[in-house]
Amino acid sequence: MYRVIVVDDETIVRIAIQNIINWEDYDMTFVGSASNGKKALELVAEKQPDIVITDLVMNDIDGLELIKLLKKAGYVGKVIVLSNYSEFEMVKETLRFGAFDYILKNSLNGANLLEVLEAAKKSIAEERKTGTIVTKVSQENSILQYQNANITRQLRRNILGDSYDLDLLRKHYPNQGYCLLYLKNDEELTTVDNPKYAYIDNIVEDVLGHVNYLCTIYIKNGSYVILCNGELLKMPFLFEKVISSLKIYTNNQFMIGVSTEFNDIKGIQHIFEEVAERMKYLFYEEENDIFNMNNYTEEKQFPVLSKELKLNMTEDLFDAINRSDEEWIRCKVQEVKDDCSSVLLDPDLLKKWLEVNIAQMMTQFDIQDGSIKNQIEEISENICNTQRLSKAMNYLESACFCIVEYTNSKIKSPEVQKVLEYIERHYEKRLSLQFLAKHVNLSPSYLTRVFKKETGQTISDYINEYKINKAADLLADNNMLIKEVAHSVGIVDQFYFSKLFKKYKGETPSQYCDRIHN
């Protein structure tokens, strides 16, 4: 983990920075704080931090003097400066002497701090990898590096709806033609472990060319916004080239949303949100990696995603799992997929529905085993992150199969096991709750509770389903009449047999025979 300390003469600032983010979640640990420059030097010697966050104006030793002393002592970590608007000349001095970056105190929040910290971590990692530590940076390069990073940071804040410096952006990006590309990983990442992602901006700039490419803004989870010259829209062949180049270099599949042209950089948030919403359509376009908004006109309008969640298959999925029938599970999952595709259900709604249903399944089937629980929760997280319908459905299948495997492997109580064995040997007979309870020396009410807890089904449901599964096997393997099969599993009433068969198999005995034999 990267070790971090903070230096500030205001107690409230030190406490705020210590608690503003959950350090361990971002591969960092907060190892201490100091109230002045002198104590900071002692703390650095003791804790050997990778990153120092320091106030610029302090009594005794100020931030600039602290940086000079750290440099003289051979400190090779990163120093991030906290300052106010009025201190920019002093900030330039700190950059000249090796400060990594700075944050304005009046805009300090968790997101802004984390953004600069992540950049510092990336720089440290690259230096460690190459074995080079930057000890001297020219004033020109340092200030230019700061300005570029600050402009990118202001663009990101604009895009994400945070406060930003509009005057700075308009000065750097005056009114002219722009477009943006929204670059997303095919499987959204919660953490980006691939070191090659650090060079995505270089790859994109190399493909688009320096005339078209303006800058790359990291958004989250392996997704990026690429700000480009509007002239790029005349060269759509480059979008596919970007995807193929990233695939070759990172071994990951990306998708791209392409905006229409816009002139005012102030509107980039609206443009981004529109592209992000429109490119959800690629969830259903399995073979397409590009959503170009410029391909749509009044005649060819944007596809409309449904916001009405009408899926009603929870009970069907529960029944399929109860049956331990993989074919039936696949059938029900396919129905979910077909229903969503037919109405173009908003992917976010579908993912939320799947997440809730998997949680309900875990409760329904009393998943207690830690490893199985973690496995299913990971599958649920993968569903939330995937950008493709087929992958979401594959994950749903996997979750169902995990639950089936768990329920089949659970050790049953001797009484329940004895009941299951009796049903297996005598399913063709009329079996009542009272008889089975007497058979295992339990009260009917207690047997009902323990049987439901261990199998997820009532005794009558289990018996009926077992009979129908046996009947299905006989219909598939023999030339017996439906009436004869019904009698062989202990169901005399053929109408009742057909009703049960359709309940558990989703079709009548006749339909089942036609499908199996034809």
Image (spheres, rainbow, N blue to C red):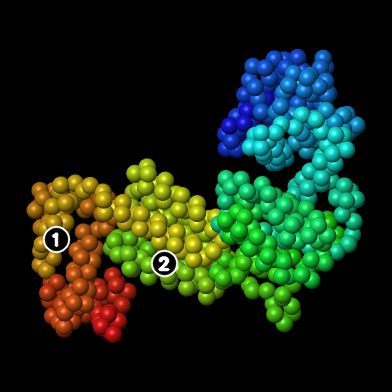
Depth check: 144 or 323 in front?
144
Identify the residue position indicated by label 1 in the image: 423
Identify the residue position indicated by label 2 in the image: 333
Q: Is residue 213 left or right of residue 420?
A: right
Expressed as whole percent of the image width and height from the top left, the position of residue 127 reads 68, 35
Expressed as whole percent of the image width and height from the top left, the position of residue 339 reads 48, 72
Mark 2 Cα within 10 Å, few/some/many (few <14, many 20+)?
many
Q: Quadrant of residue 99?
A: top right
| Number of marks | 2
Secondary structure beneath disc 1? helix
Quadrant containing the C terminus in the rendered view: bottom left
Q: Is residue 450 left or right of residue 315?
A: left
Disc 1 + disc 2, Cβ < 8 Å: no
Question: Where is 258 relative to 196, above or below?
Answer: below
Question: Where is 151 relative to 30, above or below?
Answer: below
Task: Tell me the kind of residue under disc 1.
Answer: Ile
**Residue appearing at x 66%, y 28% in the figure:** 50
Q: Quadrant of residue 432?
A: bottom left
Task: Tell me the kind of residue under disc 2.
Answer: Val
Marks 1/2: CA–CA distance:
30 Å
Depth check: 140 or 475 in front?
140
